[in-house]
Image (cartoon, rainbow, N blue to C red):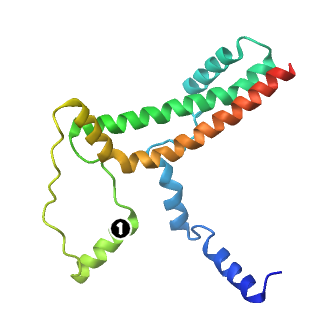
Amino acid sequence: MASERQIGANRRNARRSTGPRSPAGRNRSRGNSYRHGLAAALTSNAQRFKDIERLARQISGGAAVGALECALPVARAELELAQIRRAKLALISRVMAFSGWPVTLPSPAEIKRHLKGLLGGEIIFPKRLKIPAMPTTEPERSAEAIRRALPELMKLDRYERRAAARRARALRTFLDCRKAN
C-alpha cells in the first residue's frame, strides 16, 4: 500500500513527464523527424508502395492473397531497414568526402542560451577549433570517418533497432500465417 507522501510524489513526477505542453514545444518536438526523414511513413509515395508490394510478392512466393497481406508488413520493415542503412552509409561517406564533422544545427534552446549570454556579455567564444585532417590511408580514413560520425550514427541506431524489431514481429506473423494456410 502506498503512503500519502508516495502518492503525492508519484503525481508530481507524472505531471513533469508528460512531454511538451505549449504549442511551441509541441511544434519543436513534432519537427524532430524532419532531420533525416526516417520517422516518416515509408508508404508516403506511390513508387515506395509499388516497391513494397513487389517485395511482398517475392516474399510470399506467389501464394494466396492472404499470404500476400501477411507479407506486406515484412516487406515494409525490410525496405525501412534498407533506407536506414543507406542513411548511415551516406553519413559516413559525407564525413569521408568533406573531411569534417557532420553538420548539426543547434537546437532553438541552445541558440536562445547563446544569444542571452552574448547580450549579457557572459559567453566567451573560443578561438577557432582545429579539426584534424582525415588520414590518407584507407583503413584509418574509414575508422576516423566512423569515429567522427558516431554521435549521429548512434541516433540512427535507434531507428534501425525499431525497424529490426518490426521486421522480426512481421516475420513471426508471416510464418504463423503460412502455417495456418
Which picture quadrant has residue 133?
top left
Decide: is 178 above or below 144. above
User: Is 128 left, or right, of 153 in this rendering?
Assistant: left
User: Is 47 left, or right, of 59 in this rendering?
Assistant: left
Name the one closer to the observer, 4 or 22. Answer: 4
Decide: is 135 above or below 148. above
Q: For the residue carrying disc 1, how many other residues have a C-alpha within 10 Å: few (<14), some (14-19), or many (20+)?
A: few
Name the one closer to the observer, 114 or 170. Answer: 170
The answer, for residue 107, to whether it is visible in the render is yes
- The residue at 86%/18% (across/down) is 181
Q: Position of residue 111 (x, y in %)?
A: 33, 67
Residue reaching furthest bottom?
5
Which picture quadrant has residue 2?
bottom right
Decide: is 1 above or below 140. below
User: Is 4 left, or right, of 96 in this rendering?
Assistant: right
Which picture quadrant has residue 65?
top right
- The residue at 64%/33% (across/down) is 167
Residue reaching furthest top?
62
Q: Position of residue 169 (x, y in %)?
A: 70, 36
Secondary structure beneath label 1: helix
- The residue at 35%/71% (across/down) is 112
Q: Amino acid at mark 1?
A: Glu
Q: Position of residue 161 (x, y in %)?
A: 56, 42
Residue reaching furthest right?
180
- The residue at 34%/55% (across/down) is 105
The residue pinned by badge 1 equals 110
Q: Quadrant of the N terminus?
A: bottom right
Decide: is 85 above or below 180. below
User: Is 6 left, or right, of 118 in this rendering?
Assistant: right
Q: Position of residue 164 (x, y in %)?
A: 59, 37
